Image: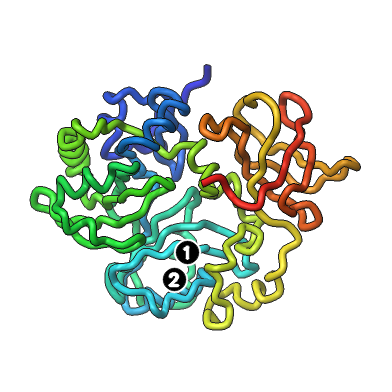
Amino acid sequence: MHYLTPSIRLRKTPFTQRVTETGVQAYTVYNHMLLPSYFRSVEEDYSHLKRAVQIWDVSCERQVEIRGPDAVKLLQLTTPRNLELMQNDQCYYTPIVDEAGCMLNDPVAIKLANDRFWISLADSDMLYYFKGLASGFGLNVSVFEPDVSPLAIQGPLAETLVSNVFGNEIKALKFFKHRLIRFQDQDMVIARSGWSHQGGFEIYVEGSKYGEPLWDYLFEAGQSLDVKAGCPNLIERIEAGLLSYGSDVTMADTPFEAGLSKYCDLETTTTCLATKALLKKQTPSRQIRPIEIEGPPLSPLTTYWPLNDKLGNNVGKISSAAWSPDFMTNIAIGMVDSASWGDGSQLLVESEEGKRTAIVKGKFWI
């Protein structure tokens, strides 16, 4: 067993004490912060997530705040998604790319005002990129990390818990929309969003001192709903096709290879630094695909597993895999060459436990 060595560089969150007290079994590191990996077991957490409600410490989704007259101009430099029609109560899933069109991050952008955004990050150091562009282009903006820590409420009973706590009007909140709620003496942004397919909300806790009181408040209110601590679940997110930046998608990939073409508005985002490069890359030679792996449950994936065709030619790789108790099979996400990505294509995956038949699927499981 290997343990993380504590240091100032490995940051705790406003909820770490409560997460520890609730019985977290393991952590990973995400954006230099602790992120819980599982509580009871990955399988038990998965089953509970699908039937009840969980509270997730996702403070590791660090925010970059962009504030000032040139806020939209700066953000549009980095993304092929058109921000022109984005409203002040909207969240946008936003591929962030470099000048060559390669993925640097895939955050959710939260528009708070015409001159103010929060960029809710996946696992990469984007603060420096935004600051560098702002300085290099001489833009009139302030770029910094605010004291904001997201807390997710996920599961089929999430809406019941949130409406019990903050009022029935919360039920009218549409997907990827946000509004203000008040907790104690602080206004906070709540969005109907989250990294699961089960439905839920994320509260952007502004002010670390409110972390533990809000956690306690939600747990007390959710006792009758079987509320438990949870975290992003490997099995459920593969079933839903939720991609993990740094695993399924990296800086080696374009949005088109990641299957994110619907977020690329290349005819209208002429100020995006990558528009010209992406116009030449709209027809990818490889792309993310759901993959079923035959046989008994495989051990956790700790490195990419090669995918080969029947002739032994490498045609891709598996980046995420897990056994699904609901579908009774090994489910996976992989990058597959175009000649082999058709629905039903049979390949061979080289796992640590030997070669297995892998079948490319036409769609994800949920």
Q: What colouring does the structure picture have?
A: rainbow
Q: Which residue is mark 2?
A: 75
Where in the figure is residue 85, as x and y percent of width and height?
Answer: 39, 79
Residue type pointed to by label 1: Thr
User: Against 240, is 226 above or below?
Assistant: above
Residues tagged 2 and 1 counted as in contact (Cβ below 8 A): yes
Q: Nearer the viewer, residue 350 or 119?
A: 350
Q: Quadrant of residue 209?
A: top left
User: Against 222, is 110 above or below?
Assistant: below
Q: Residue at x 40, y 40 (%)?
A: 33
Q: Which residue is mark 1?
A: 94
Labels 2 and 1: the sequence-earlier one:
2
**Side of 180 relative to 27 (left or right):** left
Q: Nearer the viewer, residue 350 or 67?
A: 350
| Residue 277 can be seen in this image | yes
Q: Nearer the viewer, residue 295 or 87?
A: 295
Residue type pointed to by label 2: Leu
